[in-house]
Image: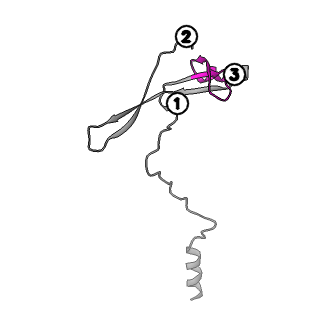
Amino acid sequence: MKGEFTTIAEATPDLKTNPEPAPPRARKGKRRSPQGPSSSGAVRFFLSKTESNGVPALDREFDNETEAIVESLKTGKNYFVISEWKALADLSKKIPLIRKETVSHRKANSI
């Protein structure tokens, strides 16, 4: 009888020394895309004017954020990231749906 207990004890694995790897956890649900201005692709970058007095005043426009960051570092001025949106109402169903649409402008040479 003593031999039976030892063989059973030897057959059971020690959970502390041989843990089984846990199965990988699957994500449930959709990953949401960022809702920031950079997700639209229609953003504009401006350097601030020095005499803004708390009210945002735009100075020079840049083609991309990298140029705006470098110029901000050189001049010590802040820079702005601007995105423009237009609200649209979809009244084709019983419940109106309000959505937004980006407004794209061509870069003007002088601002």
| Disc 1 crowd, CA 10 A, few/some/many (<14, 14-19, 20+) | few
Residue, disc 2: 109
For the point 47% across and 30% down, the residue is 40
Please determine whether, in this image, residue 103 is positioned above or below residue 4. above
Residue that numbered label 1 is attached to: 38
Element carrying mark 1: helix
* 1 vs 3, front mark: 3
Residue 104 painted magenta: no
Q: Is residue 56 left or right of residue 101?
A: right
Residue at left offset 58%, top offset 84%: 3
Residue in the foreground of this view, choosing between 67 and 78: 78
Alpha carbon of mark 1 to alpha carbon of mark 3: how far? Answer: 28 Å
Which residue type carries mark 1?
Ser
Cβ–Cβ under 8 Å for marks 1 and 3: no
Across and down, in percent, residue 82 comes to 55, 27
Q: Nearer the viewer, residue 56 or 70?
A: 56
Q: Which colour style is shown?
A: one colour
**Residue type at the position of mark 3:** Glu
The stretch of residues the image draws in magenta is 45-72
Badge 3 local density, few (<14 within 10 Å), some, or many (20+)?
Answer: few
The image shows a total of numbered marks equal to 3
> Three-letter amino acid code at disc 2?
Asn
Residue with the most extreme top position: 109
- Residue 69: x percent and y percent? 66, 24
Is residue 51 rendered magenta in the image? Answer: yes
Q: Quadrant of residue 1?
A: bottom right
Residue 41 lies, in percent from the top left, at 48, 26
The quadrant where residue 72 appears: top right
